[in-house]
Image (tube, rainbow, N blue to C red):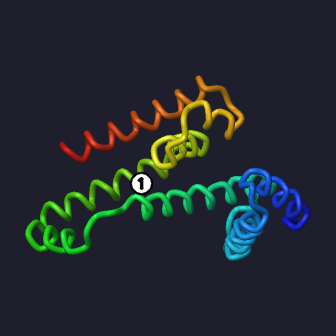
Amino acid sequence: MFEKYYNELIGYFSYYLKDKDRAYEVVHECYSRVLAMSPHKTPIREPRAFLYRTTRNIIINENLKNSRHKHSDINTEQIMDEQAEQPLEKLASEERVTKLNEAINALPPRCYEAFILYKFEGFSHAQIAEKMGISRNMVEKHIINAMKVCTQCLKEINE
């Protein structure tokens, strides 16, 4: 069922990523994840949309991981010292990060994508609008909604 979309996905993501080899990698990862899914799961009603969404999520998650590694210039010894001195603060901080991560991952797909591109990738509203094929106004709404979710999450954590 999914095979008929393979070339279409490669073409689209080659254009989207501006890198054909990278497109092959993410589409292969998508297919391996889909094939690994249990056959007992609910049947996929829209396989084409499912494949596109899964591939986009792979790209977004990898970009997010890469941007976190790229921007981490904290001294390892400093982290070790802080962890030894402040175990309760560290635990609370990890809990905040985990809860925020869960809140961000629970965002609707388009809202999630706009937020990640803005906050973690540093794209402008205009760049996001062009990349996602939506208006700048819609980008702003997505980012505002995501920020509200994050703010609410932080309020709940601090209570």
Task: Give the quadrant of the C terminus.
Answer: top left
> How many marks do you count on the picture?
1
Q: x%, y% of residue 122?
A: 50, 43
Q: x%, y% of residue 85?
A: 8, 69
Task: Give the quadrant of the N terminus.
Answer: bottom right
Q: x%, y% of residue 83?
A: 16, 70
Apparent side of residue 35 relative to residue 150 in the rendered image (left or right): right
Amino acid at circle 1? Glu
Apparent side of residue 94 relative to residue 69 in the rendered image (left or right): left
Instruction: State the residue in front, 14 or 92.
Output: 14
Instruction: State the residue in front, 156 or 93.
Output: 93
Residue at image position (53%, 33%) is 142
Q: What residue would you read off at disc 1? A: 102
Q: x%, y% of residue 54?
A: 67, 59
Q: State which quadrant residue 117 falls in.
A: top right
Q: Is label 1 in a helix, a strand or a loop?
A: helix
Apparent side of residue 68 relative to residue 51 in the rendered image (left or right): left
Residue at image position (14%, 67%) is 82
Apparent side of residue 12 relative to residue 123 in the rendered image (left or right): right
Residue at image position (36%, 50%) is 100
Q: Residues within 10 Å of mark 1 (few under 14, many from 20)?
A: few
